[in-house]
């Protein structure tokens, strides 16, 4: 499963992470940055003052039984 993690800078110097599971296979960095800009511009998250980064985590789960 791939998870998109968006990190936002807060006004107290900390970061807030928002995660989305099952991210589209061909999502681009430009699409993610544009989405983050919209979240920032519309004040969806309190105390957010900027973008801190984004990444995709690819996790494989192997059932043992």
Image (spheres, rainbow, N blue to C red):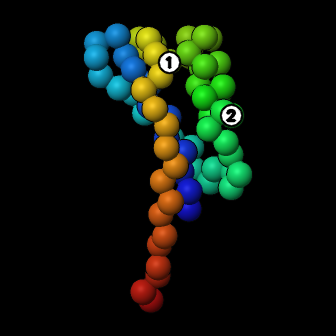
Quarter the C terminus occupies: bottom left
Q: Residue at x 56, y 62 (%)?
A: 1
In the image, residue 64 sits, relative to residue 57, either above or below, namely below
Q: Where does the image place residue 33, in percent across and percent down from the top left? A: 60, 29
Q: Where does the image place residue 61, in percent across and percent down from the top left? A: 47, 72
At numbered mark 2, what does the secondary structure look like: helix, strand or loop? helix
At numbered mark 1, what does the secondary structure look like: helix, strand or loop? loop
Which is more toward the observer, 62 or 53? 53
Q: Where does the image place residue 62, in percent across and percent down from the top left? A: 47, 79
Q: Residue at x 42, y 86 (%)?
A: 64
Q: Residues within 10 Å of mark 2 (few under 14, many from 20)?
A: few
Q: Earlier in the sequence, mark 2 or mark 1?
A: 2
Disc 2 vs disc 1: which is toward the camera?
Answer: 2
In the image, residue 53 sits, relative to residue 41, either above or below, namely below
Which disc number belongs to residue 45? Answer: 1
Q: Residue at x 56, y 15 (%)?
A: 40
Mark 2 and mark 1: Cα distance apart in space: 19 Å
Quarter of the image holding residue 41?
Answer: top right
């Amino acid at each position: 499963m791939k998870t998109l993690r968006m990190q936002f800078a807060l006004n107290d110097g900390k970061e807030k992470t928002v995660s989305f599971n099952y991210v589209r296979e061909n999502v681009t960095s430009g699409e993610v940055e544009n989405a983050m800009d919209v979240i920032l511009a519309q004040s969806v998250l309190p105390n957010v003052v900027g973008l801190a980064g984004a990444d995709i985590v690819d996790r494989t789960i192997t059932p043992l039984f």
